[in-house]
Image (cartoon, coloured by chain):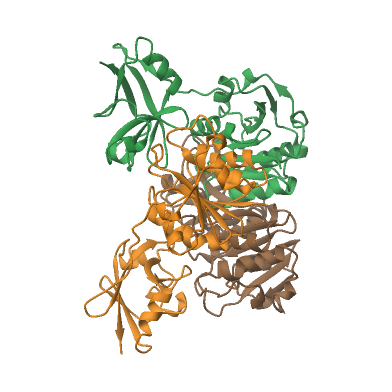
Chain colours: A brown, B orange, C green
Amino acid sequence: MPCISLTTDFGLSDEYVGVMKGTILSVNPNATMIDITHQVDPQDVLQAAGLIRSAYRYFPAGTVHLVVVDPGVGTGRPVLTAEGNGHRFVAPDNGILAPLRQDGVIRTVHRVENGDYFLHPVSSTFHGRDIFAPAAAHLSAGLSPAALGPAIPSAEMADLDLPTPTFSASGDLVGAVLFIDHFGNLITNIDAGHLEKWRNSARREKLMIKIGSHRIQGLSSSYESAGFQKPLAIIGSRGYLEIAVNRGNARQVLGAGKQDRVRISKTE
Amino acid sequence: MPCISLTTDFGLSDEYVGVMKGTILSVNPNATMIDITHQVDPQDVLQAAGLIRSAYRYFPAGTVHLVVVDPGVGTGRPVLTAEGNGHRFVAPDNGILAPLRQDGVIRTVHRVENGDYFLHPVSSTFHGRDIFAPAAAHLSAGLSPAALGPAIPSAEMADLDLPTPTFSASGDLVGAVLFIDHFGNLITNIDAGHLEKWRNSARREKLMIKIGSHRIQGLSSSYESAGFQKPLAIIGSRGYLEIAVNRGNARQVLGAGKQDRVRISKTE
Amino acid sequence: MPCISLTTDFGLSDEYVGVMKGTILSVNPNATMIDITHQVDPQDVLQAAGLIRSAYRYFPAGTVHLVVVDPGVGTGRPVLTAEGNGHRFVAPDNGILAPLRQDGVIRTVHRVENGDYFLHPVSSTFHGRDIFAPAAAHLSAGLSPAALGPAIPSAEMADLDLPTPTFSASGDLVGAVLFIDHFGNLITNIDAGHLEKWRNSARREKLMIKIGSHRIQGLSSSYESAGFQKPLAIIGSRGYLEIAVNRGNARQVLGAGKQDRVRISKTE
């Protein structure tokens, strides 16, 4: 049973997602469709890129991941299908797949430009329905990506400016809040592996995490290990440092927002 | 694999939609269920009518479209099942299906009143679960609509007052914002075909679109063809004139709302 | 086709629900997954307990109900799987299943602790993905609960403090608003059977329902039987007394909130 995952910024209040699924089912009645989310912030390519990067690996091998956050719809921006690690991706060529390329996941890339597989007439505002959905459906039914368009080198894919942590003059690690989840957890761009490496460069020092005027001592191993409504730092399920509040909402309790700076110092 | 689409105003925070789906699956374990949306504004029959009118055609032939926006639940209002263009619809008789009748889609209509197919006891507040879901499930499993109740002439179905564009004394075309989507795009009641016909009556004049104090020159072919955060007019994916803002939210940027007037003049 | 229902407080804006479903599908590609809701108020165990209690029975026999509202994730709180009435439940041991035990639904209970069935490495923040989803998937594929861990007496399951109605000195029945649904309907903890029994203790008196400064005469049999935008009391689809407003939102119109007192008097 071929699986298609869907990630868009279409929201759930209009008919857009349902229409995409109806279109997919019209092409491949056996497709199993799983929503990753349709609530990417409108036109936030960076957020979508982070979501699919961390989510894809939990799906069965052979899954087609459809990612449509596409402010350039109706312009000449290419549509791509890429393959790697047994997974397939369909997305606009606007940087959404760049982190997967950077991680070494992407092996082959094709342009999606064979109109024989599109829904006609192709609108200028809803390629999700007219191009992306039918392309993903045909791929899930076994169509070769080469039938959709020519192979291109992955180096030709659009890039994405991924904010990465830096070091302060005093040797602190300085990252930022990249996403805020439904619980109000602040997900930073500080990778657990990166943090561990930096921390162990000398010896296993204690850490002090600063965000705004708040200071958090050390990493916790569970939300409940902090006091009630107290902030804590923890390695989250995506493998990045998160700031959370036990039984509370860190965004609200700490008054924090996207792009806020998170600074980590080693202490005695 | 029989498909059932679902359109309701039930929202996603309660158990209502899940319970309808569990009920459907209890009757027809092979049903594939696709949400169109459950976020129709509460009791907004007009909005639901517009959604199903534009969405149904993208589903596989044979799909049963369940539309439950039903302020009259628990009163004597009939429940209907209608058929046309290879699709089947199940909805309260409150005008939701009127645009499909007006478009000539509806061919046959039956009342749904055979209690043998209902869930008992039938509650007075949740016919979605007790009547609509089992009826749709049985139809998707191949039950003849005649088993659910008697055929009625489609002319007996409830009507719906669909606001249509008018002409001003000076010959302008005057429509209105009918819906606002998740992106803040303002979807008018001005049909693309209608607009094209009016525009070509003399020669292919340029158009000026006015909404509130804003003026937009001509139609765009993509969102990005307007300047950053600038308003534009475009034929949207439903085939109606939309007012949008490139990389922005037209509702917010233009301060616009449902029912706002949109006026189109021909210019030199 | 084995069915898994999902009830969480994960929301729909992150990848969490999609990742759980991908994980389930990786274990059991034939699972049919139905969302009950993912919008339980964050960490509101009581609300989740009420939802699954009223929703489970509408699903096909054999359904595995996955309920993850789990503020204690990453601590030592056990994970349970329970069985009764032909349904199976997987949830943290924090009281979510207590109403089902109280209703006599639960027959057998097992701890979920066999790491052979978990996703590794097990994170400390997302047991939904690493423990609950694979456990539910394996159960839906036919795994015996005994393979997941030892049986325990249901009396050992965590308890839940369920607010129940009381009687005033003057003999009034005093309940409270327990939930507010998407329509703004106020769902109380006053069970229809309980109410009927109390009311009939003498003779079938008329009822007067008071909430805040509002008084409602008698029970209605449909929303529309009250005047436009007028409040009414009705037995809702869960079998509890609800306060609603015809074609309106009772929360807004009555200015009511969760835990507000609802008092019922017998009148002549």
Q: Where residue A258 sits: x, y (%)?
A: 47, 57
How many numbered dots are placed on residues in this image?
Answer: 0
- Residue C10 visible (yes or no): yes
Reply above or below: B185 against A235.
below
Which residue corresponds to the image point at 51% horizontal and 37% vertical from the top-left?
A: B130
Q: Is residue A151 left or right of residue B224?
A: right
In depth, the one of C149 and B68 nearer the eye is B68
Reply above or below: C154 against C41.
above
Q: Where residue C24 sits: x, y (%)?
A: 69, 45
Quarter of the image for residue C221 reads top left
Quarter of the image for residue C57 reads top right
- Residue A113 visible (yes or no): no
Q: Is residue B211 left or right of residue C200?
A: left
In depth, the one of C219 and C243 nearer the eye is C219
Which residue corresponds to the image point at 67% horizontal and 45% vertical from the top-left?
A: C32
In depth, the one of A245 and C189 nearer the eye is C189
Q: Where residue A18 sits: x, y (%)?
A: 54, 57
Reply above or below: B86 against A244.
below
In depth, the one of B9 and C255 nearer the eye is B9
Residue lying furthest top: C202
Residue lying furthest left: B169
Q: Where residue A260 sits: x, y (%)?
A: 46, 57
Which residue corresponds to the image point at 72% horizontal and 32% vertical from the top-left?
A: C113
Which residue corresponds to the image point at 43% horizontal and 36% vertical from the top-left?
A: B125
In the rendered image, the quadrant that contains the C terminus of chain B is bottom left
Reply above or below: C100 against C90.
above
